[in-house]
Image (cartoon, rainbow, N blue to C red):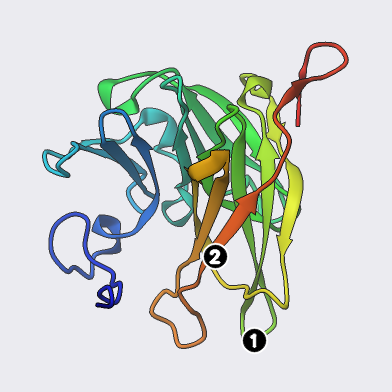
Amino acid sequence: RFAPFPHMGWLLGDDTQDKRAADIEDSTLDPARGILWVSYEQSNAIVRLGADRTGPRTVRPAAMRNWPENRGPEAMTRLIDGRFIILSESGHGWFDTAGPALLFPGDPVEGAQPETFLFSAPRFYRPTAMAELPDGRVLILVRRLLWPFPPRFSARLLIADPRAIRPGKVWTGVEIARFAAPAPVDNFEGLAVRPEAGGRIAIWVISDDNTALSQRTILLKLDWRGASRKKGAEGNPAP
């Protein structure tokens, strides 16, 4: 027997045209408890759901209140130590590469107060998703919209070390991959890291078609073969 064809469904509530209630930008999971957190950029909110996906609790952190409606908490991950990193899709200006970012010492839904810093992506790129590797570093997916018409996309994958985050300073990553032909490239906005048998690690990347005729939903599986993180010459984190 063949498995059923996959389909998209609604995480919370019913079908709605209100983007503020449906446009989830990123999600992160506590695998030990099954608790899920999702971020909404239109309302600059974080919602936590129980393991059975009921009982949602919502918080709108004060540090995110002035983030633009359509460029809010685009990338979010919960680190294995319980901290949360959240990156805005926005820079301070059209040509800026650095945008606001937060490091929460604990669950933001429980009132944890974040440190603020900046995240710098390659010029014209914006972060869209983030996931932690087993060694504590994070992968960050960044995307760029290419003009003229019809709009096209470019995407890159960065690696960064949370140990390098400093309050008020700029945090950045090192490019490790570019998505280009002959591989399919589209509006990549989702990223997941999953362990597999034999110690292998799978990197999953998914695109959002925005229900547009010119865009597609593409799911890519990549094999992670990167080296484990090590100390730099002076004990600083090094990719």
Residue 220 image label? 2
Looking at the picture, how far across and down is residue 96, in whole percent?
71, 48
Within 10 angstroms of label 1, few (less than 14), some, or many (20 or more) residues? few
Q: State if disc 1 and disc 2 touch (CB < 8 Å).
A: no
Quarter of the image where the N terminus is located = bottom left
- Using residue 125 as the reference point, say whether residue 107 is left or right of it: left
Q: Residue at x 31, y 28 (%)?
A: 32
Residue 224 lies, with reference to residue 60, above or below; the image says: below
Q: Position of residue 171 (x, y in %)?
A: 68, 31
Residue at (35% x, 38% y) in the render: 29
User: Residue placed at 36% from the left, 19% from the top?
Assistant: 112
Which of these two is toward me, 171 or 4? 4
Residue located at (28% from left, 69% from top): 8
Q: Is residue 220 above or below residue 129?
A: below
Q: Is residue 77 toward the left or the right of residue 101 in the image?
A: left
Q: Quadrant of the C terminus?
A: top right
**Residue 155 visible in image:** yes
Amino acid type at mark 1: Phe
Question: Under tag 2, what secondary structure?
Answer: strand
- Res 195 seen here: no
In this rendering, the label closer to the viewer, 2 or 1: 2
Residue 59: image location, x then y, percent: 27, 34
Residue placed under numbered mark 1 in the picture: 149
**Residue 15 shows which numbered tag?**
none
Of 110 and 19, nearer the camera is 110
Residue 7, image quadrant: bottom left
Give the secondary structure at mark 1.
Answer: loop
